[in-house]
Amino acid sequence: MRSHEIDYEIIGNDIQIIEVELDPGETVIAEAGAMNYMEDGIGFAAKMGDGSESESGIMGLLKGVGKRVLTGESIFMTHFTNNGGGKKRVAFAAPYPGKIIPIDLGTIEGGELLCQKDAFLCAALGTEISIAFNQKLGAGFFGGEGFILQKLVGDGMAFIHAGGTVVKKELRGDKLLVDTGCLVGFSTGIDYSIERAGNLKSMFFGGEGLFLATLQGHGAVWLQGLPFSRMADRIIANAPSAGGESKGEGSMLGNLGTFFEK
């Protein structure tokens, strides 16, 4: 199934919105709850799966749904279709501060991208969204994302989201070491594994975690500057209920300033 050819515009800098332009009859699929606004004439329907199993019968549909259950995602995806007579637009919002990454799967070797299980935002109809099991035990236990990665396959546009600044690296057989939480996605020509972060002293006191992701091969790698888990940890650590500061954040005295209020 060939993907629909959709046009798009990314709006904003830090908390972005992607506006997708649909010709009559074109469809874009998205995670449930991602839609921000849409123009009159666009219809939407929650369906089980991404629509790529339409010709494979009920067993193919159940297989796709079962894969989404393993990733922790909703079993339903929302399909937005232009039922009008002219071009119509529908927009999707990023779930947290960061960047929306447009990826033309048709330009990637094999038309396949592996990414974090919660990175997918939306894609042209015809894109297959499933899972891939990491076959290496080390990557599964210590890779931060477990054994399961999300796999996008197709020949059209797909859009993923990452936290903070996004960097794209092109590997030509060289090796790249990455903090496990900062890895967003990579093409199928990249070998992904986990190795120990230096000696025991560096592992426990270096502040970089016990393990690093090792990426080697030929292809593209996308990295994020601010993983959502890291941002959430900082927010929770500084929340008043967790013992963080509730006021006086700008004081040079910091915690010492609150001592005199008690």
Image: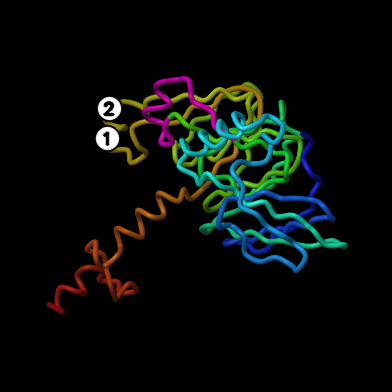
Q: Residue at x 63, y 33 (%)?
A: 113
Q: Where is residue 7? Give x, y as percent.
A: 79, 53
Q: Residue furthest bottom?
A: 261
Q: Which is nearer the eye, 177 or 232?
A: 232
Q: Is residue 132 magenta?
A: yes
Q: Which residue is mark 2?
A: 200
Q: Where is residue 16? Give x, y as percent.
A: 62, 60
Give the class, few, some or many, for how many residues have Cα within 10 Å of label 1's Cα (few <14, many ≥20).
few
Q: Where on the picture, by quarter, is residue 261?
A: bottom left
Name the amino acid type tagged 2.
Answer: Leu
Q: In the rendered image, is residue 152 in sight?
A: yes
Q: Residue furthest front?
A: 58
The N terminus lies in which quarter of the figure?
A: top right
Q: Is residue 76 magenta?
A: no
Q: Where on the picture, by quarter, is residue 179?
A: top left
Position of residue 46 in the picture relative to residue 97 (left or right): right
Q: Is residue 44 above or below residue 240?
A: above
Q: Residue at x 30, y 71 (%)?
A: 252
Give SS at disc 2. helix
Q: Which is nearer the eye, 9 or 45?
A: 45
Instruction: Tell me which segment is drawn in magenta.
Output: 130-146
Q: Which residue is mark 1?
A: 204
Position of residue 225 in the picture relative to residue 7 (left or right): left
Give SS at disc 1. helix
Name the amino acid type tagged 1.
Answer: Phe
Q: Residue at x 44, y 29 (%)?
A: 147
Q: Which is nearer the eye, 236 or 120?
A: 120
Q: Residue at x 76, y 40 (%)?
A: 156
Q: Is residue 82 above or below residue 61?
A: below
Q: Where is residue 88? Give x, y as percent.
A: 79, 62
